[in-house]
Structures are given as structure tokens and as C-alpha cells.
Image (cartoon, rainbow, N blue to C red):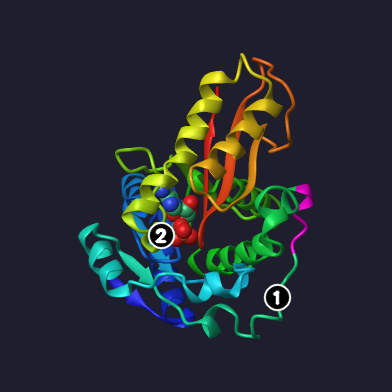
Amino acid sequence: MILYKTVQDIRSQIKTLKEKNQKIGFVPTMGALHEGHLSLIRQSKQQTDVTVCSVFVNPTQFNDIKDFEKYPVTIEKDIMLLEQEKVDILFLPAVIEIYPNGVNEVKHYELGYLENILEGKYRPGHFQGVCQVVHRLLEIVQPDALFMGQKDYQQCMVIKKLLEIEQINTELIIVPTKREADGLALSSRNMRLSDGAKEEALAIYKTLNHIKNNIQSTSFEELTQNGADFLLNEGFSKVDYVAIADANTLEPVEKYDPGQKLVALIAAFKDPVRLIDNMTLN
Ligand code: AMP
């Protein structure tokens, strides 16, 4: 694996790869790598010639400074894992490489309603930050395929929109969510949970399954309200949302229609950590 820290250096390597017609797969991450990230990398290894992974904790996508400051950093272990997976290139930039004009001189993207619902509603500015970093990384890496996790369902939809509005010729490949054996979605933020809290956090997965199993027989209002109550009873301190939405547009849906693809999404605090998860329902 070759490690690049500057845009200039990685660019000249990308240019060489492009000249050789190598198919480039790209996996952007914020580090603290786990099996979820590795599943994206493995898929990229299977489908492309060269896999580039980036590790960059992007300051502009954190609306909560404490969340940013507490974000786990395990770079030595990350490098070891990436070498084990035979990643070809690791891009590990400093903030100045990504934001040469500073983090306040950034572009604004017209994301439409996607920006202000669900995650967007509870994390104002978050998706602008995601677009800023992903757009910049795509300009640098110029990948043929971009691998992202279904775990961040709305993020995938936002990036799909970004590719459309910026007319970027990269294929977005969405990889299913990796879970612990008991069902808890893997997340870098889980590192901040005690074993007991992790066990309690399983209530999110149970709620998603409950919704999936009862989607035809119970009203959506009851499912989402009972889901939120269940999470609070199971030791969650705050529930941002339990929602059932159209799987293609993320628009809210009020009742079951067998012809409509649905997704259930949850965001809730297992103090002090905010967890998200989702499940497609049909
Ligand atoms: P992050 O480092 O959290 O920004 O995540 C980097 C990429 O890994 C994103 O595309 C995430 O959606 C993806 N990812 C995170 N957790 C998982 C998981 N449990 N399963 C699959 N992909 C994941």
C-alpha cells in the first residue's frame, strides 16, 4: 500500500493509473475502521483494478463540536487493517489539503428537500459538509466507482444527487450494512459505548425488525410511535426520529401500499452517542 498525504502527490499517481486504463475504486472513510468499512473495500477489490481508501475526519460535516472532538482516531490500527486488505492506495490528507481556502470558504449545494428531512433536520449543515468533502475527494481521486454503505442511507441518496448535479461520471455502489452477530449495526461511534450500552443499543435493530414484521398489519403512526417509546424504555435518552419513508425518495409515507418500496430509519441517543440505522422493508 502506498500512503499519500498531499493532493499533489496522489494526483500524479492517479494520472499514471488513468493513462494505464486502470479502473479505480474509491472508499472514503473517517477512519476508526471496522468490518463495515472492510466490506466496502472488499467489494471495491472485487470490482476494480485499484482500490483507493481515504481516512479524513471531515470537520465541515459535524454540526456538534463535541462529536467532532470525540470522534475516535485509531490511525495505526487502520493502516494495519488496510494493509491486510491489500488496499493499493491510502490517502491521508490534512485539513489544509482538502480545504485550501479554509473550512469557511466552501461551496453550497442545492440538495432540495433531502437536505432538510431526517438527518438533515437534526444535523443542520451536515449534508453540505458531506458534499463538500466527497466532491473534493472525487475531484482528486477521479474514481470509476465509489463505494458507500447503506448504513448511511440518506447520505447515499445525497451523494447520488451530488453526482447528478455536478455531472460526475462515477458509479455509486451501495454496500449492505454490516452488523454484529446480534444485529447491532457496526459503527465507529460504537467504540464509545460500554458493553452494557451496546447491548441496550440493540433496541434499534429490534425496532426496525418489529416495523418490518408488522408493516402490513399495523398503522405507520402506531409503529413509529411505539418504536420511539420502546427505545426510550430501553435506555435511549432521546429519539430524533423513527420514520417510515419511500425507499427511493425518502418522502414520508403514511400507509402501506404493496407497490411502494419502503425503508424504516432511526436516529437516537444512547448517551452521549448518537446512533443511526435503517432497514428496507419490502
Ligand atoms: P464513516 O467512516 O463512518 O464515514 O463511513 C465510511 C463509509 O463506510 C460510509 O460509506 C459508511 O456508510 C460505510 N459504513 C459505515 N458503517 C458501515 C456498516 N456497518 N456497514 C457497511 N458500511 C458501513
Q: Secondary structure at mark 2?
A: helix
User: Can residue 1 be seen?
Assistant: no
Magenta-drawn segment: 109-113
Q: Nearer the viewer, mark 2 or mark 1?
A: 2
The residue at which mark 2 appears reads as 188
**Residue beneath the point at 41% across and 46% down:** 200
**Residue beneath the point at 68% across and 56% down:** 122
The residue at which mark 1 appears reads as 106
Residue 13 is a magenta residue: no
Q: Which mark is residue 185?
A: none
Whether the residue carrying mark 2 lies under 8 Å from ligand 1 is answered with yes
x and y percent of residue 145 in the render? 47, 51
**Neighbour class for label 1 at 10 Å: few (<14), some, many (≥20)?**
some
**Residue beneath the point at 49% across and 48% down:** 235
Q: Are marks 2 and 1 in contact (CB under 8 Å)?
A: no
**Residue beneath the point at 60% across and 85% down:** 100
